[in-house]
Image (tube, grey):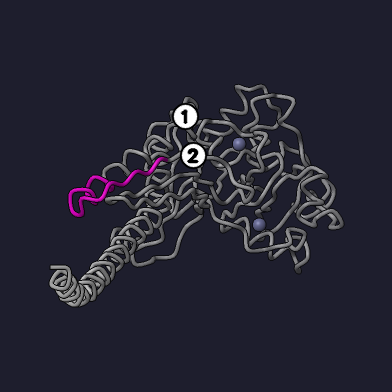
Amino acid sequence: MDNKGFVMSGLAFLLIIPSIILLIVLVNMINLDDSSNIMMTTDTTFHISGDVERNIPILTRQTIKETTENVVQTGNPVSNSRGVIKNRIQTKINDLISEYQNNTGINIQCNILSVDSSSDPFEVEINSTISVQKDNISYNRNIIQKVPIIGLKPTKIFSEETHEYNEIPDPLPFIKCKNYGGLKVNMGRITYGSTLSNYLNKKGVKNYTMYENSSSGLYIKKCPFDPYISHGNSNKLQTLKNCIENGYYHESNDGACFLCRLEGKAICSHYGLETFIVPAGTNKSVSTAPCSIDHVLFNDDLNGIYNGEAVEYYSTFNLYFRIFLDNGHRTKYGISNIETFSENQISNKEN
Ligand SMILES: [Zn+2]
Ligand SMILES: [Zn+2]
């Protein structure tokens, strides 16, 4: 009995060996399958997360453009522009995400945490989190993105919609001038007619008539003449003339940032923007007038609307084209050493 039992257990042992080998192979196969599944899932979550991430700046641009165009139409400021824009981007992102979820069954979340001014005033900063979950795999990411507010050249995404430069207008003049007569928009410029002089007059500003038929740039366009002191370098102020005629915007410590402009503020604590508001050509001799910088003319405080000295950047046989700049802005644009035309010179010309 003892011997038989021994033989049986020996046989059983021999039978067990292939089973073990088979089991090992099977387990390996299962493992292999599992790992390829993991790779596929990770790929999809990465792909979707990347897609959502790429869409945030596009939806942000769209939102800022729509919000700004609404202000331009109505003249009504957006109170708490950061919060309003944040919520509007979130709504657009949620629509996008529910589409992904319906198509893939993958659980995605994207929260826009904040929309704020950036260290570069030609950008806004978007802070968000993306999390993607599928089975046991989850992927989380915090992202900070900088979205330009200057015009963009057509890209694949933008050209499909508009086939043109996707430029964003400056909302500030439309808010400030709302109750002082209409603004006209023509060829990328704002023409003020009597609106700005009317506005300045009602504020109690002297010499307001210089801003009769003045104009300024409509879109936020970054001035290419950098460093700014080069504005005064060229012969006959050709660079300054070029900048003025293109309605370029400049970085500014005083001028409001884009998001504060949407709220109707001319100045703010953030690093911001400024542009020239340009008086119409005249045959009159004027050497001093309110400073031709937007954040000066649109300053809420009457004391903030200071004067500047005439800088003549162009003239025809009987029309003189001038802007008025204080010492600070002359220095900034490199115009401090250039002689401006005194009353005397101007009246000589007129004679
Ligand atoms: Zn410039
Ligand atoms: Zn600001």
Residue that protrudes farthest toward the front in the picture: 1
Q: Are marks 2 and 1 in contact (CB under 8 Å)?
A: yes
Please provide percent x and percent y for residue 142. 49, 48
Question: Where in the image, quadrant-wise, is ligand 1 located?
Answer: bottom right
Identified by mark 1, the residue type is Pro
In the drawing, does residue 143 fall left or right of residue 139? right
Identified by mark 2, the residue type is Pro
Crowd band around label 2 with a 10 angstrom C-alpha radius: few (<14), some (14–19), many (20+): many
Residue 303 location, quadrant: top right
**Which stretch appears magenta?**
96-111
Q: Is residue 133 above or below residue 211?
A: below
Label drawn at residue 77? 1
Crowd band around label 1 with a 10 angstrom C-alpha radius: few (<14), some (14–19), many (20+): many
Which residue corresponds to the image point at 71% horizontal and 28% vertical from the top-left? 206
Q: Is residue 269 above or below residue 102?
A: above
On the question of residue 50 being in view, the answer is yes
Which residue corresponds to the image point at 52% horizontal and 33% vertical from the top-left? 195
